Amino acid sequence: MNAPETVIADPEPHVMHTYARLPMAMSHGRGCWVWDTAGKRYLDGLGGIAVNTLGHAHPKLVPALQEQIGRLIHTSNYYASPLQENLASTLCELSGLDRVFFCNSGLEANEAALKIARKFGHDKGIARPEIIVYEKAFHGRSIATLSATANPKIHAGFEPLVEGFVRVPLNDVAAIDEVANTRPNVVAVFLEVIQGEGGVNPATTDYLRAIRRLCDENDWLLMLDEVQCGIGRTGKWFAHQWAGILPDVMPLAKGLGSGVPVGAVVCGPRAATVLQPGNHGTTFGGNALAMRAGIETLRIMREDRLLENASAVGAALRAGLVRELSDVTGVVEIRGQGLMLGIELDRPCGELLGRAAEAGLLLSVTAERVVRLVPPLILNAPEADQIVAILCPLIESFLQETVPS
């Protein structure tokens, strides 16, 4: 007689099953460490997926947010907002761009960017404007942003996709030249400076400069999605600054609010006035709490020199990973910049999420075979050494026990 099947109770019976969760729940955090509800401690190599810029319970951020909650959380965009102007002014100063629209997330920021591009085209008399997007890109899960995204698994079940996207490979200037010569309705190029969900794939400096030149020559908008790689993660405020260029449109989110939901679209002069009253809007975007979180995040980053920290500690973390893994069979490449690093393996490695958690380290696996590290920007050198000490043996043992595909 067969043994009865074991039925595991659903720990969240009223929550839609849109995530494949690990079997743990977090209770609290301090700095780069978090504790689950069972009391186990983890080193946070994921940072809420590049969100928790200042780590957890930062002693400068917490009282500022408490003070703001006691004063004002939300009114509406019917009224002027000094906090919006404050944060917008700082973002314009840091980016060299002109104006900012505030929203709630990276998806919303990217959706606004797509609307800017389409209206830019319509204003030029192009009835069916097209936007160049990229293989392995990820821009969100709304119908428009998933259409701009490259992953067929994200498309599946949500067709028909939104039209108007022309897809090309990353770092291939010839492919863009061909589009310029054959697609007269193109109005913008939309790319992540470092593809996050696609596997931590950087656009090269030479490629970014070439795309800026082609956009100028063809009167296209250059739209750089810095949702994941911006806000100091690579050691500069924005990843494209390593190439010495300026975008026309720059969506931001994730790290801007250190965990408080906030998104922004920062625009240069060619795009700053495309949207007019009635063209776009948001109920919650730019609310007082989110703006205060952004203001305080950028202030603390400056005071605590977190750009320099991201560069130095990120370089040390990468060096440690290279030292321990570069000669390991099955490790394809270690890439990225600052505190946005990916370790590509020659096989799917989603199993490493659970193994790492058991060992006390939080991380993610993206593009099926890339271990992604995006820790808080307050990570210090001893903590980076701990990541290396925990992660590298896990990767080695996983590669020894599994078969490449």
Image (cartoon, helix red, strand yellow):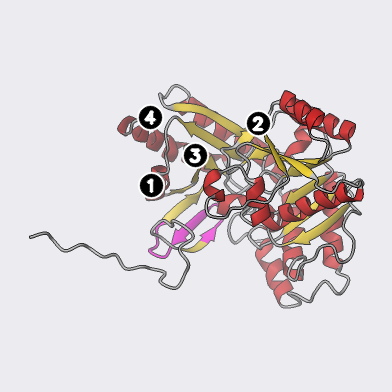
Circle number at residue 139: none
Q: Is residue 355 left or right of residue 378?
A: left
- Neighbourhood count class around disc 1 (C-alpha, 10 Å): few under 14, some 14–19, many 20 upward: some
Circle number at residue 371: 3
- Circle 4 — which element? loop
| Residue 37: in magenta span | yes
Amino acid type, callout 1: Ala
Amino acid type, callout 3: Val
For residue 395, say whether it is visible.
yes
The relative height of residue 10 versus residue 337 in the rendered view (above or below) is below
| Farthest top residue in view | 327
- Quadrant for the N terminus, please: bottom left
The image position of residue 317, as x and y in percent, is 55, 35
| Dot in front, 4 or 2 | 2
- Circle 2 — which element? loop
| Residue 21: in magenta span | no
- The part of the image, by quadrant, that contains residue 294 is bottom right
Q: Which residues are magenta?
A: 29-40
Labels 3 and 1 touching (C-beta < 8 A): no
Identify the residue at horizontal 82%, vertical 71% (top origin): 77
The relative height of residue 269 versus residue 281 in the rendered view (above or below) is above
Pointer 1 or 2: first along the chain: 2
